[in-house]
Amino acid sequence: MAGRVRHPIDMRALENWISKNVPEIEVPLDIKQFGFGQSNPTYQLTAADGRRYVLRKKPPGQLLSKTAHKVEREYRIIAALASTDVPVPKAYCLCEDPSIIGTPFYIMSFLDGRIFEDPIIPNVLPDERRAIWSDAVRVLAKLHRIDPRSVGLENFGKSTGFYNRQIATWKTICDAQSRVEDVETRVAVGQLPYFEPMMRFFADEKQQPVDRGTLVHGDFKIDNLVFHKTEPRVIGILDWEMSTIGHPLSDLSNLLTPYFTARLDPSKAVNVHPGFLPRATRGLPTPDEITRLYYSVVDPQTKSALELSLHNSQKSADDQERKRELQWAMSFSMFRLAAICQGIAARQAGRQASSEKARRYGEARAPLARFAWELVQAVQPGAESGKSRL
């Protein structure tokens, strides 16, 4: 919800700039800040004619990371996707001049719809819950089937080697995080359980999914989607800050995360949704159904129908390989979540994060790493088929 402005903006400078560069937005403007979008402050602009828009800007002050908070990158991909069947807000303008409101910003259309913060999609009938999840999967598949060159995004990222780069990056990060000592006890954070064997497994290219590169969102999940007010239909994808050219399974595994974390102990892990346990919530599709629907849209030649199938069919060799690849991607996704929690523990050790939430996330690193190792073991050669989590 939009509320009072916590990061003040020079409204006169903004309105003058808009009048000169985006005359279709009528000034004066009313401004309110959204509660979400903490990474990049996000505001609702109401124009003189009552039309609403959204402004996204970089945070004020010196930024710690040169790669984070790339509102320019968000604007670029939203503008590029306007000509496709991927639903995105309309991009109106990008201002890279920090003298206007203190940081670069862009303005896009306001999407008047529903955002479900809980991926269970509470308070709807089972058929609608199923339809909502189904359309989220379709939209993701539509994004992944776009040729970046067709929308001018061929230089948006490297087309090969996504997972190898991720593995190298996270190995370096985890090594550094593990050495951070508590400022009082001088006890190091320590390395994640099974870190070395997991790194060896992930680095083995024979085990990795077939290397490919598509446009990826980077944080594709239910609460980053805006749905129609009354229809189970996605009308826009938000928060493109982490978008790039990468491996499509990184997005699909991110969407499936609540199905996997559901079986963890909520007192030891984070973001646990017991409602995603098998048959716990009516209308939720299964991971197998989601995967079949996804591939049927990415590749229309897939035998599965475009709607989620409730019937088990004989799995082909391609189906089995896709399942193995997704199991690998899911393993890496869980490891990455453990590494992120290790980073929170490191910041807590340095007293850069001291909230109860930060403590819980930091303590979740070991259970998540053990769970990632469990998934790795299930996908390694010789693993019993019954151990598969998909």
Image (cartoon, helix red, strand yellow):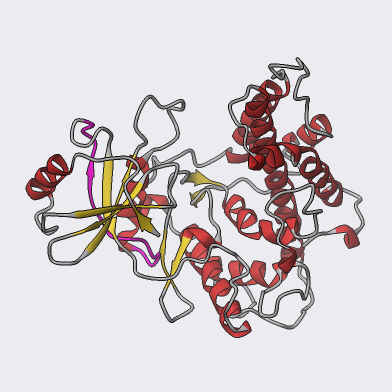
Q: In this view, does 105 lie to the left or right of 34?
A: left
Whether residue 2 sits left or right of residue 172 in the image: it is: left
- 131 to the left or right of 19: right
Q: Check the picture and name the quadrant holding the N terminus.
A: bottom left
Residue 116 coordinates in the image, percent (x, y): 52, 66
Q: How many labels does the image show?
A: 0
Image-quadrant location for residue 197:
top right
Left or right of 386 in this view: 166: left
In this rendering, does residue 35 appear at all?
A: yes
Image position, residue 325 (x, y; %): 71, 53
Using the image as rendered, state which of residue 89 and residue 213 is in the foreground.
89
Identify the image quadrant of the C terminus. bottom right
Where residue 9 appears, x then y in whole percent? Answer: 24, 40
In the rendered image, is residue 306 in sight? no
x, y percent for residue 102: 25, 32
Placement of 179 over or under 332, stated as above or below: above
Report the magenta residues as a range. 84-98
**Residue 86 lies in the magenta-colored region:** yes
Instruction: Please report the residue visible at 52 percent of the width from the left and 73 percent of the height from the top.
Output: 135
Residue 148 to residue 135: above or below: above
Q: Does the magenta stretch include residue 328?
A: no
* Residue at 81% across, 53% down: 265
On screen, residue 171 above or below 88: above
Q: Looking at the magenta stretch, what is its main secondary structure?
A: loop
